[in-house]
Amino acid sequence: MSRYRLNPTPAQETVLRDHCGHARYVWNLAVEQHSHWHPGRKSAPGYLEQCRQLTQARAGYPWLAAGSQTVQQQALRDFTRAMAAFFDPGNPARRPSWRKAGRDEGFRITGRRGRQWDVRRVSRHVGQVWVPKAGWVRFRWSRAVPEGVKSYRVRLDRAGRWHVAFAVIPAPVPAPGNGQVVGIDRGVAVSAALSTGQLLHCPGLTAREQTRLRRLQRTLARAKRGSNRRGRVKHAIARLRARETDRRKDWAEKTSTGIARRFDVIRVEDLKIGNMTRSAKGTREHPGRNVRQKAGLNRGILRSGWGLLVRRLEEKAPGRVEKIKPALTSQRC
């Protein structure tokens, strides 16, 4: 997806928040319907039946009818696709779960009928995208909007930033044709070590930012739940976390593009990152050992962006990424 930073007005931001709440409400209703279903019972309602139920709900609840029907129907369509991906044997997607306020804030929109597209450029660095009930919302034109886009998603992250992402599958990076092969060994101190001898480090928070993060976390532990002070501290922590995430994504994008352009074949370890970062605390009957040390190692692995780097390599260089058994690969590399 191509993501851009939205700059809504206060009135538009109120409308966007209402859309997020309506989409989350409809999604959770669909989850509740399917949570009571099992193979022995009657089949759960499909998309068309849920749309009819949504029409009845909008007629009975004025606050729901005040929202955009397009946003609410797209939430049902997204849920239907998520369930199809869950039942697909070749798809590793999990079962759709509940969405929580403050964590899962977003909604999807498709282009209106009779219009070629709902985005326009205003100036060199400013564009506008059409959102139902909100009108034309400005966003930063950081790069050209890709062609062939039929839907876009508006999202609010925990740091309070609005983004719009246009759904499009970019073209893969062409192979250089030089016949070169590279092996990538992933680690914690060195995020990615290439067989050519190049060492790549995933950027994170600076020492000063880490110190501030620790102070904020101590302040959060002392703040009273539900207080305005606690909300301000949580927002400050979320901004630091978002900055770290942005740097990791930027590093993964640039690194994967550079590797895909330089080598024909890319070999990586077939690591089970989910199993490697599982907690070691154990149970009450069988408590774990070195739990704090293992937690620090898990954080280091997740900060290194192992899975993100390989996923972007597979998307940019399809058919050229080979996964091999990780045994003794670090010594050979």
Image: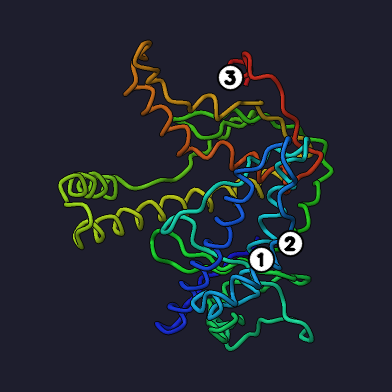
In the rendered view, would you say 97 is above or below 128? above
**To which residue does mark 3 refer?**
330
Residue depicted at x 76% and y 45%: 317
- Quadrant assignment, res 71: bottom right
In the rendered view, would you say 91 is above or below 268? below
Going by the numbered disc 1, the residue's amino acid type is Gln
Residue 332 percent across, percent down from the top left: 63, 16
Going by the numbered disc 3, the residue's amino acid type is Ser
> Which numbered disc covers residue 49?
2
Quadrant for the C terminus in the image: top right
Please report whichever mark, 1 or 3, sits nearer to the chain's N-terminal start.
Answer: 1
Q: Closest to the observer: 313 or 190? A: 313
Going by the numbered disc 2, the residue's amino acid type is Glu
Residue at the extreme top of the image, as rendered: 286
User: On the rendered structure, is 219 left or right of 172?
Assistant: left
Number of other residues with Cα within 10 Å of mark 3, as a class: few under 14, some 14 to 19, many 20 or more = some
Mark 3 residue element = helix
Callout 1–callout 2 Cβ contact below 8 Å: yes
User: On the rendered structure, is 196 left or right of 241?
Assistant: right
**To which residue does mark 1 refer?**
53
Callout 3–callout 2 Cβ contact below 8 Å: no
Mark 2 residue element = helix
In the rendered view, would you say 275 is above or below 67? above
Residue depicted at x 39% and y 22%: 294
